[in-house]
Amino acid sequence: MTRLTVLTVPDPRLRLKAEPVAQVDDEIRTLMNNLMETMYADDGAGLAAVQVGIPKRVIVMDLTDHYPTLKPLKIANPEITWRSKETKVELEACLSVPDQCAPVERHLAIKVKYLDENNILQEIDAEDLLARCFQHEIDHLDGKVYIDYVSPLKRQILIQRAQKVVRMKK
Ligand code: NI
């Protein structure tokens, strides 16, 4: 496996709309594994291929800390097929906005269909944190970052703080 470099705001590549994959083959499985390694190395709970500069609709998530029976998820072409009317506001963070967080309103529950690492179609009912993570990661595939949900002024501050963190880590 290879650890990849996570792009950070305001990198324009984070704004690309990702293309669906034709099928989950060895190339996509390798990408999924590399995303997993990168996510673990950076202590994240989710990562989208867009965040490493690969505009394909592929994401990985590991929420086993919160859902002990849920295995790490390797996901291609996710599609939200239902959204609850009820929403909830919680703090979110993102490896592309290092060391920052902000409150974001999300649908409390959703249904998602996707292809797993074996190219098998899966459908999952997600609530709370799992639903939030899916919405956050799927946003990345459409060129959206969670800071888009805060005011322009707050967004600028988050970007500046994240840039400072990146500079200090170099
Ligand atoms: Ni993110």
Image (cartoon, grey):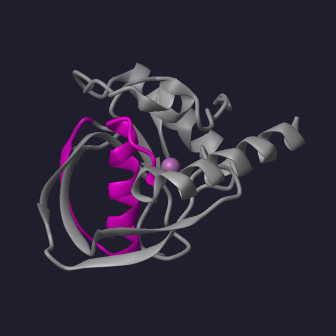
Q: Residue at x 30, y 43 (%)?
A: 116
How many marks can you see?
Answer: 0
Q: Residue furthest front?
A: 153
Q: Return the x and y of residue 47 as percentages of the image width and height.
A: 51, 45
The x and y percentages for residue 92 are 51, 65
Is residue 122 part of the magenta span, yes or no? yes
Q: Residue at x 48, y 32 (%)?
A: 14
Describe residue 66's horizontal placement relative to residue 138 as left or right: right
For residue 43, above or below residue 32: below
Res 46 visible: no
Over which residues does the magenta segment extend? 119-146
Give residue 159's position: percent from left, percent from top. Answer: 63, 46
Q: Nearer the viewer, residue 120 or 145?
A: 145
- Left-right relation of 82 to 125: left
Q: Is residue 160 left or right of residue 119?
A: right
Viewed as shown, does residue 166 lie left or right of 126?
right
Q: Residue at x 57, y 60 (%)?
A: 93
> In x, y percent, where is residue 139?
35, 46
The quadrant where residue 100 appears: bottom right
Name the residue nearer the viewer: 16 or 155: 155
- The correct choice, above or below, for 18 with respect to 32 in the image is above
Q: Quadrant of the C terminus?
A: top right
Is residue 60 found inside the magenta-colored segment of the image? no
Residue 33 visible in rendering: yes
Quadrant, the N terminus:
top right
Place residue 85 in its image quadrant.
Answer: bottom left
